[in-house]
Image (cartoon, grey):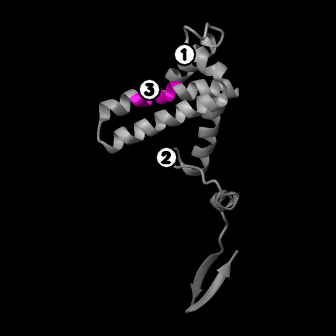
Amino acid sequence: MSDSLDRLYQAVLAARDLDPEVSRTARLLRQGPAKMAKKLAEEAIEVAIDAVNAKPDAVIRESADLFYNLAVLWAGAGVRPEDVWQEMDRREQMLGIAEKLPKSSDKIAALRPVRRPIVAMDGGRRRERR
């Protein structure tokens, strides 16, 4: 998947300088971050609605539009796909690939391994070893 997104991102960069009358990508990039964000949000909502309505073919089509608009937003924001992949790798190290990193720094700190004392029973009495 990342190869496809990388190719899409490169195509978006290549279209940046095209005529905005001809290129939707050039037009979106020139319209600025608010317009790019709006288009991305619209596509995300369409994917969600189609998923709720159990329309897998529509989810596929709208997901492709979502990826396109995400690549345009990245290009406009100066974000490279490899930056996102590095963040994905970092998160995988902390939580596993299928988990979302919590927003709260307290919750992130709680993810760090904590060394707990080893407790052993000695003749019915509790004895802690460190």
| Residue at mark 3 | 64
Of mark 1 and mark 3, the one earlier in the sequence is 1
SS class of the residue under badge 1? helix
Examine the rendered structure and indicate whether residue 36 appears above or below residue 17: below
SS class of the residue under badge 2? loop
Examine the rendered structure and indicate whether residue 113 appears above or below residue 120: above
Does the image show residue 103?
yes
Answer with left or right where residue 6 lies relative to residue 45.
Answer: right
Give the magenta-colored segment's residue range.
62-68
Type of the residue with mark 1 = Arg
Q: Which mark is residue 24?
A: 1
Of mark 2 and mark 1, the one earlier in the sequence is 1
| Residue at mark 2 | 98
What type of secondary structure mainly makes up the magenta span? helix
| Residue located at (29% from left, 36% from top) | 55
- The residues bearing labels 2 and 1 have C-alpha atoms spaced at a distance of 33 Å
Give yes or no for residue 66 being in the magenta stretch: yes
Displayed quadrant of residue 87 = top right
Type of the residue with mark 3 = Ala
| Residue located at (61% from left, 50% from top) | 94
| Residue located at (60% from left, 28% from top) | 36
In the rendering, at what x and y percent does residue 13 appear?
63, 15
Front residue of 77/94: it is 77
